Image (tube, rainbow, N blue to C red):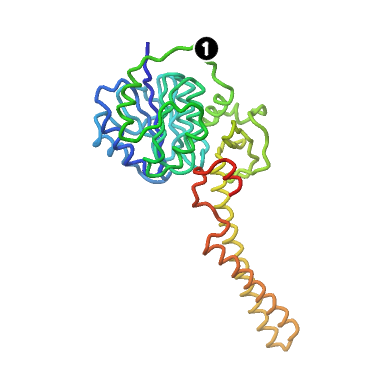
């Protein structure tokens, strides 16, 4: 009888330190494969495998598309690729971003749950916002185990807190120092088989979208229902995939957002719009002043006065926008809303 031999780990801000501590205390004979997603910039190189191999006892490398999934190894998602799990193999894909990330945590957790069910342990470590929450929910639905770093122990509490608040029956909430020994115990614990556990339609649908399967892109029978919101990445309609208090959205092409991430993206779009408005108003004021001077040179005083008033009005409006940009009033992109309850998020 197999143990919990598929360990999927997600981390974001503060994750290098947390992952180093975790792998340092995993034994060389660990009877499990460990798959890791750390949020990294898409167009940068990653030295995480080198860091973790030096820190720990297990062979560590960036995952390669199509390579076999072996026990006793650590596989890292490379920059700009989702790391997905198939029965016996790994897959890399440049599918749609989830929660504005590629690699993202949710696709790894979701595909591991689909492929291995109760054999999976999902681990959420330090990070902002809430990537990993939906994936951990999929792990639990398929009978796997959910392990979360204690928010009080995490450098950034957003991701752990979101998982705890939105995933039913978290199995273990532990400080980082206690996680390695607990994982070793769980890896060596046989998986209890509790009848048939069919794969929910939503997990199949979202896993296929991560692979950019055309059948799902063209599928009109999508889970959820259309929402009033547009996708910040492509402008398409977002479908509401909410589960209980966990608000989630996904567009036709596959971009996916939690409520907190969507709000952060909308804040980014708002700031971009404000900068564009500031530029337009400053240009209008400059042009109006230039035209007014020409009018005065031609003794067209009334036209010059009208243009000067337009310039002053544009400068006043620009000053208001400039103040908003400087103070950040109404722009909440830097606030970690995942630390708030659902009602508080809505109020914010």
Choose between 108 and 165: the one closer to the eye.
Answer: 165
Q: Position of residue 193 (x, y in %)?
A: 45, 12
Q: Position of residue 213 (x, y in %)?
A: 55, 28
Q: Is residue 38 visible?
A: no
Choose between 336 and 50: the one closer to the eye.
Answer: 336
Above-or-below relation of 331 to 193: below
Name the image quarter holding the N terminus: top left
Residue 331: image quadrant is bottom right
Choose between 174 and 264: the one closer to the eye.
Answer: 174
Choose between 219 and 256: the one closer to the eye.
Answer: 256
Q: Is residue 45 visible?
A: yes
- How many marks on residues? 1
Q: Secondary structure at mark 1?
A: loop
Above-or-below relation of 123 to 44: above
Does 270 sit left or right of 227 as displayed?
left
Residue 252: image quadrant is top right
Q: Residue at image x 67%, y 73%?
A: 313
Above-or-below relation of 69 to 10: above
Label 1 neighbour load within 10 Å: few <14, some 14-19, many 20+: few
Q: Residue at image x 63%, y 39%?
A: 238
Q: Residue at image x 55%, y 37%?
A: 256
Residue at the spot of label 1 = 196
Q: Position of residue 103 (x, y in %)?
A: 44, 37
Q: Position of residue 212 (x, y in %)?
A: 54, 31
Q: Residue furthest right?
A: 302
């Amino acid at each position: 009888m197999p143990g919990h031999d598929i360990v999927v780990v997600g981390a974001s801000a503060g994750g290098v330190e947390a992952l180093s501590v975790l792998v340092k205390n995993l034994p060389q004979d660990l009877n499990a494969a460990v798959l890791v997603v750390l949020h990294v910039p898409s167009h940068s190189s990653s030295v995480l495998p080198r860091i973790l191999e030096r820190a720990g006892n297990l062979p560590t490398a960036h995952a390669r598309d199509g390579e076999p999934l072996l026990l006793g190894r650590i596989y890292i998602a490379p920059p700009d690729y989702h790391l997905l799990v198939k029965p016996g193999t790994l897959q890399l894909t440049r599918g749609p971003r989830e929660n504005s990330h590629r690699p993202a945590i949710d696709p790894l957790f979701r595909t591991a749950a689909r492929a291995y069910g109760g054999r999976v342990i999902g681990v959420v470590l330090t990070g902002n916002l809430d990537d990993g929450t939906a994936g951990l929910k999929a792990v639990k639905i398929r009978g796997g185990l959910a392990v979360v770093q204690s928010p009080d122990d995490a450098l950034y509490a957003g991701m752990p807190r979101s998982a705890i608040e939105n995933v039913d029956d978290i199995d273990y909430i532990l400080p980082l120092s206690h996680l390695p020994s607990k994982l070793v115990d769980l890896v060596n614990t046989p998986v209890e088989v509790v009848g048939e556990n069919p794969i929910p339609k939503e997990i199949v649908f979202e896993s296929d979208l991560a692979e950019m399967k055309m059948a799902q892109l063209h599928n009109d029978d999508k889970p959820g229902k259309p929402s009033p919101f547009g996708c910040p990445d492509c402008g398409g309609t977002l479908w509401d995939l909410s589960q209980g208090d966990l608000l989630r959205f996904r567009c036709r092409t596959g971009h996916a957002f939690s409520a907190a991430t969507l709000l952060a993206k909308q804040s980014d779009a708002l700031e971009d719009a404000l900068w564009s408005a500031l530029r337009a108003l400053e240009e209008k004021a400059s042009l109006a002043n230039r035209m007014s001077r020409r009018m005065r040179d031609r003794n067209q005083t009334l036209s010059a006065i009208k243009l000067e008033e337009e310039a002053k009005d544009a400068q006043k409006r620009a000053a208001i926008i400039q103040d908003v940009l400087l103070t950040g009033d109404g722009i909440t992109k830097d606030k970690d809303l995942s630390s708030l309850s659902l009602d508080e998020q809505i109020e914010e």
